[in-house]
Amino acid sequence: MADDFISFGAKLAQHARRRPDAPAVTCGTETLTYGQLHRLSNRLARALAARGVKFADLVTVGLPNSGGFVAACYGIWKLGATPQPVSFRLPKGELQAIIELAKAPLVIAEFTHEVDRPVVSVADLLAQSDDDSDLPDQIPPISKAPTSGGSTGRPKLILAGQRGVSPTNMPALPFYQIMPDQTVLLPAPLYHNAPFSLTMGATQVGAHVVLTPRFDAEGTLDEIATRKVGWLYLVPTMMNRIWHLPDEVRGRYDISSVHTLWHMAAPCPPWLKEAFIHWIAPGEVMELYAGTEAQAISIISGSEWLTHRGSVGRVAVGEMKVVGEGGTELPAGEVGEIYMRRAQGLPETYRYLGADARTIKDGWESLGDLGSFDAEGYLYLADRRTDMILVGGSNVYPAEIEAALEEHPAVQSCAVIGLPDDDLGARIHAIVNVQGEVSADDLKAHLADRLVTYKRPKSFEFVDEPVRDDAGKVRRTALRDARIATANS
């Protein structure tokens, strides 16, 4: 290995030697210093090795946010193995399918499911080993292996193309503007790729990562004010819940310490984005569009967004183009399928396990998103190809309707799907989680001057639980299939 890179484990050891008492990870009332995180992960690595984990294994991790989650991942890396994070709420069938794909020797979790692999908790592993001395250095051939596609019943793993290494001297994480000794707040579940990657990147730099057991809108503002958070990650669902707090509640907390806010993972309604830009400051609100596959990335600052409203930015890494039905590249202003390609000469950024990429010639790949470029090269997303609803011959994009619904002060989260309709082919159905007394007629009146008639939902379903998870993700396919199955039963 070149002298300018060291393993993830060696990087943690470096921080532990240089600044053992500096805070590394906080979640709730628990804080691990860099020295504690290093020693704890050494113990976990030895216990995992005793249970059969070896170099190049994928190890499934299904834990809630905690210092133990981060320590477990470092323990895995120290063996040259790869963390394979999954939701701690996974149903048994989906968990079994994933661990079979991963060929995981065990699962680090607190599941009560009976699956055909041992399931062990962090406490189980720590009880097995109290040896916190350093291990022989190992470089994992794969840095991470998140999952995708579980809503279809056919999960796939996305194996990162990067090894588990960091620069020996890494004064900052410049791409995301994360600095050492900075407090970064990630109130999102670590089983999703963005918060997982950002947490690990921030600890590689030596920042103080603050996690939350689960997202709470006012609690997030309290964390910012109390800990003087300088860097913040949110998804649009979180932003929506924060913005819908009463003005006097939002005004109670000093968030002036925040110098950078990144949001990603889901489309952000323009009205909400604009509200945050004016609240926090244009240059500080950053947005990234990419897939976990990371073939290409677009970025936009708040200042740019104000002059390119609704855009997700210009391509900063790799290449993107918009392709029509015939496979030809479309001109500016026309909506088509977005295809991506890594920069020429660079190695593969990922590899699927359990699926094949959607490709066209010359190495272009699609994640299924639709969008268009303007004449200046700014990208605008429409929706997922599989989520688009065809209503009487017109293309309807759920994200547009959801953005309009979430402007209503009582709407906490929502999802829009298309259900079969004998006349128009599809009927637009909105699943809505609201706060307070709100009727379908109230929502119809709210949408009357926001959406053209054919885009307005024909039916509304009110639910008690948030429709999107804390990472801002929604499984429209699963929601649609469940309602069709119920109607046909």
Image: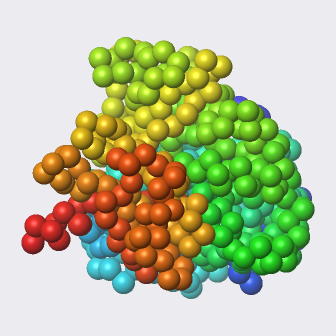
Question: Does residue 349 appear to the left or right of 251 in the view shown?
Answer: left
Residue 311 visible in image:
yes
Question: Does residue 68 appear to the left or right of 358 in the view shown?
Answer: right
User: Where residue 321 appears, x then y in whole percent?
Assistant: 49, 22
The residue sitting at 31% across, 60% down in the picture is: 458
User: Where residue 14 appears, x then y in whole percent?
Assistant: 81, 55
Q: Nearer the viewer, residue 38 or 204?
A: 204
Q: Where on the picture, by quarter, is residue 34?
A: bottom right
User: Where residue 204 appears, x then y in whole percent?
Assistant: 74, 52
Residue 129 visible in image:
no
Question: Does residue 13 appear to the left or right of 295 in the view shown?
Answer: right
Question: Does residue 46 appear to the left or right of 458 in the view shown?
Answer: right
The residue sitting at 46% across, 23% down in the picture is: 334
User: Where residue 305 appears, x then y in whole percent?
Assistant: 71, 38
The residue sitting at 39% across, 54% down in the picture is: 456
Establish if 215 lies above or below 3: below
Q: Quadrant of the C terminus?
A: bottom left
Q: Nearer the viewer, residue 270 or 88?
A: 270
Q: Nearer the viewer, residue 55 or 334?
A: 334
Colour scheme used in the picture?
rainbow
Q: Quadrant of the N terminus?
A: top right
The residue sitting at 62% across, 63% down in the picture is: 240
Q: In this figure, what is the number of numbered marks?
A: 0
Establish if 418 lies above or below 363: below
Q: Where on the picture, by quarter, is residue 105?
A: bottom left
